[in-house]
Amino acid sequence: MKIVVTGATGFLGRHLMPVLIKRYGEKQVMGLSSKDYNLMDPGQVRRMFEECKPDILIHLAAYVGGIGANRNFPADFFYRNILLMSLVFQAAAEYKVKKLIYPIGGCSYPATATSPIDEGQMWNGYPQPESAGYAMAKKMGLVASVCYRQQYGLNSVVIIPGNMYGEYDNFRTEEAHVIPALIRKFFEAKRARAKEVVVWGTGKPVRDFVYAGDVAATIPFFIEHYDSSEPVNISSGTSTSIKELAEMIKELIGYEGEIVWDTSKPDGQMVKIFDISRMKSLGLSCPTPLREGLKRTIAWFERNYDNRGDGIRL
Ligand code: GDP
């Protein structure tokens, strides 16, 4: 059984590769990046299937970015991701892969979804407009999963990770999600002996953070035991306010100054929590406590910050 991972050098990919290698052995697992094939080019997609001969394809390659990038280049996010998705589904069907696993983001849910967000809410409305190009392109993977199963018998599975964080995340200030953004802010403030750290919003919004290593650890289950186009939320199912998060990161980094809330910055959705009943009914969990996951993420960040090591995105 040959397992091929596209986007293997990305955030989730770097958590997933060791999980797969440990379980299936080095010879069975092949990781690809955009340097190997341009999967927006139909010819190169075919070449990838012919040369790599995947039995199982885990398609993590995507064009991702923060809210700023999404706002400036919505068409690029739409076009590139819909190509990356449709070309690979089509070729996976033609080359008869045994299974295709495809993640989409929680941002594909309607902007008006009510927390806890269960998979049944997916088609109730339009996503957050700022990232709709990205979110809708990814969301079409759900349609592809159903259509290709119907016409070609392609066994594909769509998973929906919650707000992932962990080592290898994107720490670039303009692009980062809240956890890497705050880790960087508190770390740099501690070094500079700054008196205060500015955190966006009121601190009241609540999120469901999930450690990327936990998401990666569920993938073998989907390879081995799940054969349905019904998507599955993969998250911790826990609620943490941005205030609690900021205080925890401050403490773990050992920063002694003040937190200042910049309420001119947007809070975004007030509550975004995922319903993980379906995931739990499959016997899966994402058990790493936030504190533990943050410790690992901070340790990795601190190890790599000065020498720009381990592919850290700063
Ligand atoms: P979201 O889950 O899609 O809203 O994405 P984010 O991770 O970017 O933001 C989550 C929450 O953290 C929002 O309420 C932000 O206002 C808040 N937040 C506080 N400080 C920051 C920061 O420095 N960067 C980011 N990205 N969010 C922050």
Image (cartoon, helix red, strand yellow):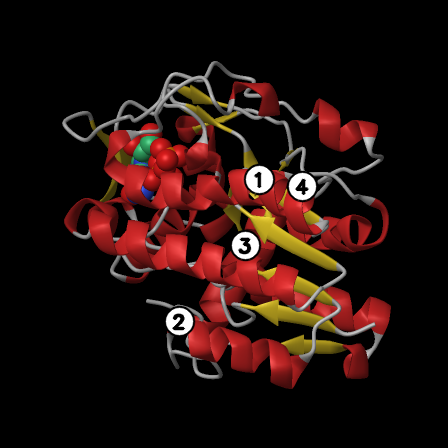
**How many numbered circles are shown?**
4
- 67, 300: nearer the viewer: 67
Which percent across, then down, holds residue 1?
A: 83, 72
Nearer-N-terminus badge (2/3): 3
Circle 2: is it few (<14), some (14-19), or many (20+) Cα within 10 Å?
some
**Label 2 vs label 3, nearer the camera:** 3
Q: Amino acid at mark 1?
A: Ile
Q: Amino acid at mark 4?
A: Gln
Which percent across, then down, holds residue 266?
A: 22, 28
Which percent across, then down, holds residue 26?
A: 78, 81
Q: Amino acid at mark 2?
A: Tyr
Circle 1: is it few (<14), some (14-19), or many (20+) Cα within 10 Å?
many
Element at label 2:
helix
Q: CA distance from mark 2 to mark 3?
A: 15 Å
Residue 160's label in the rendered image is 1
Identify residue for label 4: 150
Identify residue for label 3: 166
Nearer-N-terminus badge (3/1): 1
Circle 3: is it few (<14), some (14-19), or many (20+) Cα within 10 Å?
many
Nearer-N-terminus badge (2/4): 4
Element at label 1:
strand
